[in-house]
Amino acid sequence: MTRALMLCLICSWLAGCAVNPATGRTDFVMMSERQELDLGARYNQEILKQYPRYEDAKLQAYIQRVGERVARSSHRNQLNYVFTLVDSPDVNAFALPGGYIYIHRGLLAYLNSEAELAAVLGHEVGHVTARHSVRQQSQSTAWGVLGQAAAIGTGVGAVGDLTSAMGNAFVRGYGRDMELEADGLGAQYLARGGYDPQAMIEVVKVLKGQEDFARAQAAKRGEAPTAGGYHGLFDTHPDNDRRLQEVIGPASALVGGNQEVGRDNFLQMLDGLVFGDSAASGIRRGRNFYHGELDFALTYPQGWQLVNRPDVLIGHTADEQAFIAMTLEAADKRLSPAEFLRKRVGSQRLVAGEELRVGALQGYTAVLQGQAARRVAVIYRGDNAYLFVAAVKGRASLETEDQHFLDVIRSYRPLKAAERKLAEPVRLHLVRAKSGQSLSALAKDSPLPADGEAQLRLLNGLYPSGEPRPGEWLKTLR
């Protein structure tokens, strides 16, 4: 049975077909607009717990204004759209059902005009107006229902499992078709809102530059390149991508006059924007980690990499076979550090325990026994308990990396006076390009010595080898 026939049968069983407000096509959905709005509002609360808002009221208001201007020209302009700048260095943007749209400051930093910002937001509005997340959720649910029906009809439960697996594979990610549809819709909304629809192509160039840079970095390390993230992979340059040009082309007919780009004003809004890690989550600098607000530092072994998230700090070997995670919890001062750990692990057994002394601070470390043994530790400081969990993957035993784990744990220390500056984030600052000035010369003062020049080119839309024009504003890092 073909997928189309299956979906038609499900439509007839569940009355789940509706006209898409953006495309005019009949789509399979199992959610009313009211349910969509309620779902988005509920998920929004969860998202804001994981991804805090960037603390800049003026910049947040600016992004809301630009987003609303685009959304007013959309197929679902009656929705109450909420646009949020997320305090995250990731190059990403996403939308929830019902009009909740988020852009990470990591992506914002690489944009170079208000029209490009409007293009990102318009693309996400396109996902909302075309009800992409609702369609995915409906298809996923339908595959599950179909699997249950097949299992009941045959008496073989494995049929249900197989069909569910097929459904999960089918709906994983938006896929390029939906991304291109969102590009086309977003370009229409840009043109109707008075922006240059070519900005959609410019944004895809930004993402392509990020992808090419990641590939170059992976090749330098001798690693396989990772799959594309936010927009999906483009094998060709965006200017030469036939399908991308086809979906954006019709928006040119909607252009009414001088379409706005808004470069200089936009760049002024970015002056001072945090780049990379924030003070709230701590700063990675090579093999060291500094947290100004919590007043501590850690040092990791040479060659290890750090992953910094709001809720956890992870250090791992280059092959990702050994890792140590640190989280922050409230200390129970009624318990000693050893008692805290024993209570934390419950019925599991701790062995080889020993007291930790970090200056005047007290802690405890031990090995948690099991099929995959783990090194655990806790350090008390004020009202906080810094909890460490370390392990190895594959066939290796804990002993192969345990000394490294202990070195990381014992490196915990209050910040020294000379380290406080290192706990401050890198920020974007604007300069006027001078005649004959090259990005390689500007990169000499970059706080990112390893990739300083490449990052400056990416930030200014000049990757891999472009040079600035005299007099134009440039983003620098310091």
Image: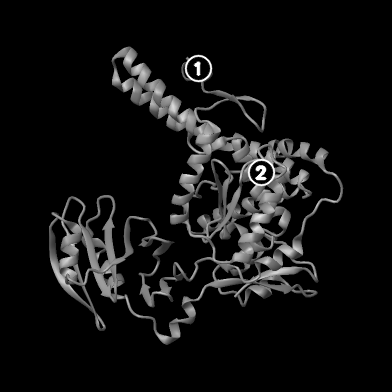
Asked if residue 203 can be seen in this view, the reply is no
The residue that appears at 72% across and 71% down in the rendered structure is: 438
Vertical relation: 362 (above or below) 120: below
Q: List x then y, in percent, for residue 239.
A: 73, 45
Vertical relation: 329 (above or below) 211: below
Q: List x then y, in percent, for residue 334.
A: 17, 71
Tell me the quarter of the picture where residue 254 sits: top right
Q: Check disc 2 and report its element: helix, strand or loop.
A: loop
Q: Amino acid at mark 2?
A: Thr
* Quadrant of the image containing the C terminus: bottom right
Q: List x then y, in percent, for residue 358.
A: 26, 79
The label nearer to you, 2 versus 1, is: 1
Q: CA distance from mark 2 to mark 1?
A: 32 Å
Tell me the quarter of the picture where residue 22 sits: top right
Q: Mark 2: few, some, or many residues within 10 Å (few <14, many ≥20)?
A: few
Q: Mark 1: few, some, or many residues within 10 Å (few <14, many ≥20)?
A: few
The image's mark for residue 2 is 1
**What color scheme is it?**
one colour
Mark 2–mark 1 contact, CB under 8 Å?
no
Q: Amino acid at mark 1?
A: Thr
Q: List x then y, in percent, for residue 284.
A: 45, 69
Vertical relation: 232 (above or below) 409: above
Tell me the quarter of the picture where residue 251 sits: top right
Judged left or right of residue 53, residue 125 is right
Vertical relation: 429 (above or below) 369: below
Observer-nearest of 348 and 461? 348
Instruction: Indicate which disc, 2 or 1, sits on the residue closer to the N terminus.
Output: 1
